[in-house]
């Protein structure tokens, strides 16, 4: 599945039992309406995450779920029958079935490992790129609706993504970057987040079609200044910055655009290379790549194949998706499966 760099295969069967349409129906039956963006990302129509949080908290209250805050677990031990959980306060809790749904909290991985599970190496996923480049200077907040970006290794494309792109104070963000960081999480980590990025600001144009388009515009608008009149659906500030970057003077009219300058401009717009110099600040990552090894889990029930009556759900598993609700969906689906399995009497 294209929305899950890790876990897509295992989720296929799980999604036949509880999928996005079930999530939509569940929330809408409780008064929360959702919307789907053009690229498939899903959000509440309020565009406020508190809408989802409040709905879940209210449902927990109605169904009698007991929530305990500041009850940090210190250890989890498997008993002959059930589990013993020791809190940092020294209090002991016991249960016959246990669900670990700790997200990316290190405690969850430690408990899983101590109970016999393998933890796939943990690295950040869904993060922004630090790029210090004069072509991006003073453009923070500028965005394009659809960009095509490639992650390069020695000029060869390793991964590619399309989608909205946002220029920030520190480099680049937006769905296109976040998706690329998810699929390239391990590659970027192994390269210490120092790689090359090739960017086409205006797909579906390629160098040949763009050159033809610019030549036609040049013929029809000979006296207009290149700097001031863009024939492309790009933000004005971005167009002007890229025109300057290839050495075209602000006063140059289209009729004086040389063949060499035209080629440089086309290359900059469709094949510009940028150096990734790091990722977003630590703890600004959205999700974690890695977690409990999926082969050790029964995806019909989310029960451990290694430790009976132990269940897992959500990000503690080696599952992560791209931005736009996909991580929430995998968490809700695996939780739904685990909850139903745990609630059945033997």
Image (cartoon, rainbow, N blue to C red):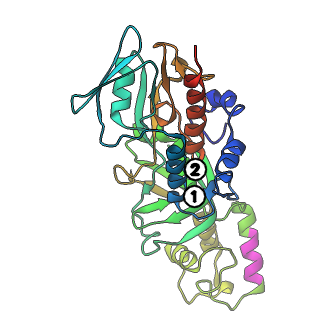
Question: Can you tell which mark lies on residue 150?
Answer: 2
User: What segment carries the magenta color?
Assistant: 212-219
Relative to 71, 204 lies left or right: right
> Dot 1 corresponds to which residue?
199
Q: Secondary structure at mark 2?
A: strand
**Disc 2 from disc 1: Cα separation:** 6 Å
Say above or below: 342 vs 218. Answer: above
Q: Residue at x 66, y 58 (%)?
A: 33
Mark 2–mark 1 contact, CB under 8 Å?
Answer: yes
Does residue 244 appear in this view?
Answer: yes
Q: Is residue 148 above or below residue 143?
A: above
The answer to whether 269 is drawn above or below residue 108 in the figure is: below
Furthest toward the top, the residue is 80
Reply yes or no: does residue 216 show up in magenta.
yes
Residue 158 visible to the viewer: no
Q: Quadrant of residue 76?
A: top left
Precedes in sequence: disc 2 or disc 1: 2
Q: Residue at 65%, 85% (x, y): give it.
A: 229
Q: Quadrant of the N terminus?
A: top right
Provide the secondary structure element on which disc 1 rests: strand
């Amino acid at each position: 599945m294209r929305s899950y760099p890790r876990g897509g295969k295992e989720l296929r069967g799980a999604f036949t039992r509880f999928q996005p349409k079930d999530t939509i129906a569940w929330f809408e039956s409780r008064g929360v309406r959702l919307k789907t963006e053009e690229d498939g990302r899903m959000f509440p129509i309020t565009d406020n995450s508190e809408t989802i949080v409040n709905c879940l908290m209210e449902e927990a209250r109605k169904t009698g779920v007991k929530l305990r805050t500041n009850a940090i677990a210190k250890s989890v031990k498997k008993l002959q029958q059930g589990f013993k959980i020791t809190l940092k306060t020294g209090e002991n809790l016991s249960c016959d079935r246990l669900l670990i749904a700790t997200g990316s909290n290190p405690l969850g991985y430690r408990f899983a490992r101590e109970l016999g599970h393998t933890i796939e190496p943990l690295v950040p996923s869904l993060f922004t790129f630090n790029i210090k480049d004069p072509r991006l200077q003073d453009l923070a907040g500028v965005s394009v609706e659809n960009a095509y970006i490639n992650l390069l290794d020695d000029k060869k494309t390793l991964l590619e993504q399309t989608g909205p792109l946002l220029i920030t104070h520190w480099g680049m963000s937006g769905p296109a970057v976040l998706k690329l960081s998810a699929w390239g999480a391990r590659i970027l980590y192994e390269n210490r987040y120092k790689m090359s990025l090739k960017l086409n600001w205006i797909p579906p144009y390629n160098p040949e079609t763009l050159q033809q388009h610019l030549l036609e515009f040049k013929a029809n608008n000979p006296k207009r200044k290149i700097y001031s009149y863009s024939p492309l659906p790009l933000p004005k500030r971005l167009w002007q910055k890229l025109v300057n970057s290839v050495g075209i003077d602000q006063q140059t009219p289209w009729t004086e655009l040389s063949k060499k300058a035209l080629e440089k401009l086309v290359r900059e717009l469709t094949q510009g290379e940028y150096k990734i110099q790091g990722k977003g600040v630590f703890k600004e990552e959205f999700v974690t790549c890695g977690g409990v090894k999926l082969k050790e889990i029964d995806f019909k029930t989310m029960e451990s194949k290694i430790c009976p009556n132990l269940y897992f759900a959500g990000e503690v598993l080696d599952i992560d998706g791209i931005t736009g609700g996909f991580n929430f969906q995998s968490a809700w689906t695996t939780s739904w499966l685990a909850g139903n399995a745990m609630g059945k009497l033997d």
